[in-house]
Image (cartoon, helix red, strand yellow):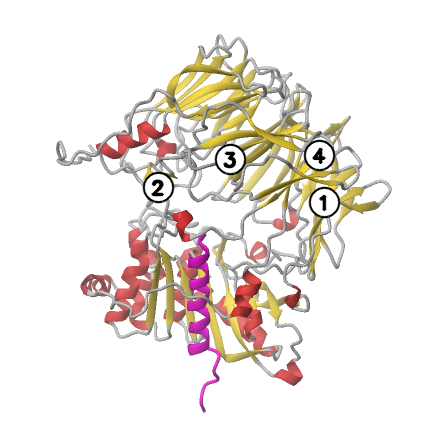
Amino acid sequence: MHRLFITLFAIALASTPALSQDDSYKVPPKDIIDVVDAPLTPTLVPGWGDWGVLYEPPLLLTVSDLSQPELKLAGLRFNPRSHEQTRAPYGRDLRLLRFSSGEQRAISGLPSPLRARNVTWSPDGARLAFSAATAEGVELWVVDAATASARRVGSLLLNASSPSRPFHWLSDSASILARTVPSQRGAEPVEPRVPAGPVIQENAGRRTPARTYQDLLKGPYDAALYEHHVQSQLALVTLEGTTRLLGTPALIVRAEPSPDANYFLVESVHRPFSYVVPEFRFPRRIEVWDREGTVVREVADLPLADAVATDFDAVREGPRSAGWRADRPATLYWVEALDKGNARSEAALRDRIVTLASPFRGEPQQLVTLALRFRAIQWESDDLALVEESWWKTRRTRTWRVRPGQPDAKPELIFDRSSEDRYADPGNPVVRANGQGVLVLRRTRDTIFLFGQGASPEGNRPFVDSLNLKTKRAARLWQSEAPHYEFPVMMRDDRTVITRRESVNTPPNYFRRDLRAKSMRALTSFPHPTPQLAAVQKELIRYKRADGIDLTATLYLPPGYDAARDGRLPVLMWAYPTEFKSASAAGQVTDSPYRFVRVSPMSPLPWLVRGYAILDDPSIPIVGEGDREPNDTYVDQLVAGAKAAIDEVVRRGVGDRDRIAIGGHSYGAFMAANLLAHSDLFRAGIARSGAYNRTLTPFSFQAEERTFWQAADTYMRMSPFTHADKINEPLLMTHGVDDNNTGTFPIQSERLFAAMKGLGGTVRLVMLPFESHGYRARESVMHMLWEIDRWLETYVKTPKRE
């Protein structure tokens, strides 16, 4: 096996792809273009008053958008001119929606063209703020709901280079804490033509594993660029536009005001940086500042975290997950590991949560200790906070009630279940805005409320429950009913919920629902974006794997299709494997048969208009119960799941067994290549942005925690690259040239292509300029669709000759 791997790798290194005779962007047939270019349904960003805002995302960017200047430093990607995240989605239109009446208002004064991000309502619900990207930089804008008018606030430019939100409302709803570009920071460092010396890395016997991160610092010049561009100046900006600078510029990556607006929690990174881990592992200083910008408490100065294990429950030592108690004026909390962050060590207790109130002197007070790893906390009062803990290895998750005002009170267990068991998921606690506009648990006496997906054998049926904290019993207040899929978006009071409702042939719209009167009122009426697909047939189908595990998939058939009249169809099967520790959980239904048929360009659904049956998201569970690891039998379970899906569509009389293609994105692409290598179930394969050689991701991948050296045989068996000589069906691969996803380096596709080419396989590799892991530019997406359509028409659609 290992000798074969070395031989194939040598072939790959020696192989070079031939130049294409026509390398211009192509477009697919018009019927595909029409469904892909259909407008997107606006998304609601609810406020806590009577207003929400409808946010319309752009369809696709352009290659010109993606070709703007971009720096890739320490795991970040940003435009060095404007200091905005280069690939984050933005809103191209904002429109106000009144909950009490359904009235919609256009907003005057918006910048044009609009590139709105970070849309956030003020605590009193009277205004919303957003960042607007321009050629000069990222500006801060505010919309007044009463006048439906927008205006820029202040003259400083926001620094949105880091992914956290660059501004936060203060509780007075009249001022904003902003992370801005320093006005006196000087010129950008100039790259020296002659380096001062080599780039040196060293390790002196410490275990410092790391996943295959991308966009890392490569040397001193990169470090200087990162330091220059991420440097930020905090400022208090009033709605009148006055600005007061706070403290001195630093590499501030997060800054949040306390509920009473008298203090700020500030996190910044500092040297020494690292060439092997991204920004979130850099040395980090956590501080509390007052309104003058003076540091009143240093919570921690954490060292470089380059030795954190790759285990999913491993964490860095020292204070982490610091935040404000939402229910108190100015009380800080944070989490500390009691096991040194080592998930492999035996420990009765893993974490503890501590609190520290203003004026932040003395030692913090312990709130609770946890036997599993901390995940989240939600506050309500001195009498109630909910703490969630979980452990990946066992898939166990628990929720506890603690009483912050009674330090000696014993925590009460509220939920204890498997995180894989979707049917037993009780839902998520509902929140409301308190007097400071901070989100706390919605509580009425001894009752809290829950929103849930309502997973069941019949599919997802979202619900609203009330939970009695004394009896621990839940009561169902409302649940989505067939033939609709309706999900609660926000709870306005104990009886009124805003929901998002859709059906197979009705696009999502927003409703105001009265839980007591059991009535509802439409707030929006968005039209069907693709009426040509209104008659698409959609069904959640059920079948079994050979080992008895229950499986499901969503089967789509073209409008007007009749099996008796039209016969069997070519099939495009699109999947993504999932690991489980329980066979019963692996067989649970994961979707709803009543979701709207929205054709995303990255989904397989565009081929409905080309006469294909689509088998979307068929269950491909990889199960390892007890002490067994799922991936040790990955290939066998993968093939068994695919075969069961094919057998079912053939049994139903709609699929032609000899005309089925397999496709997937990322880990789904890895799956597709493996299925071609280890079975003859498919005529062809489509693999987008995958990883195919697991020796290039040696410190774990996906849900695999073991390293290559702990499970070398598993890594080798799972790698399609080591079995490239067995891929005897046509394989189309696409990959973004600038893919920054952990593990899916572009070289993954390049090396598999080179191996298959050297071995005489039928393979095509398309590298998309400027694209990352998901494709954003219209030119790229249309060309990808053209490639897939041509591949399917050439290798799949035509019946085999007898």
Helix, strand or loop under label 2: loop
Using the numbered discs, state the Cα–Cα distance from disc 4 to disc 3 in whole angstroms.
Answer: 21 Å
Say whether disc 3 or disc 1 marks the residue closer to the N-terminus.
3
Residue of label 2: 70
Which is closer to the viewer, label 4 or label 1?
A: 4
Q: CA distance from mark 1 to mark 2?
A: 39 Å
Residue 781 lies, with reference to residue 93, above or below; the image says below
Residue to which mark 1 is pinned = 499
Horizontal placement of 16 versus 599: left or right? left
The disc, 4 or 3, on the residue closer to the chain's N-terminal end is 4
Per the rendering, the mark at residue 802 is: none
The residue identified by callout 4 is 51
- Magenta stretch bounds: 776-802
Callout in the foreground (3, 2): 3
Pointer 2: residues within 10 angstroms few (<14), some, or many (20+)? Answer: many
User: In the image shown, does 528 or 514 lie closer to the viewer?
Assistant: 528
> Going 36% across and 32% down the picture, which residue do you hit?
281
Residue 132's mark?
3
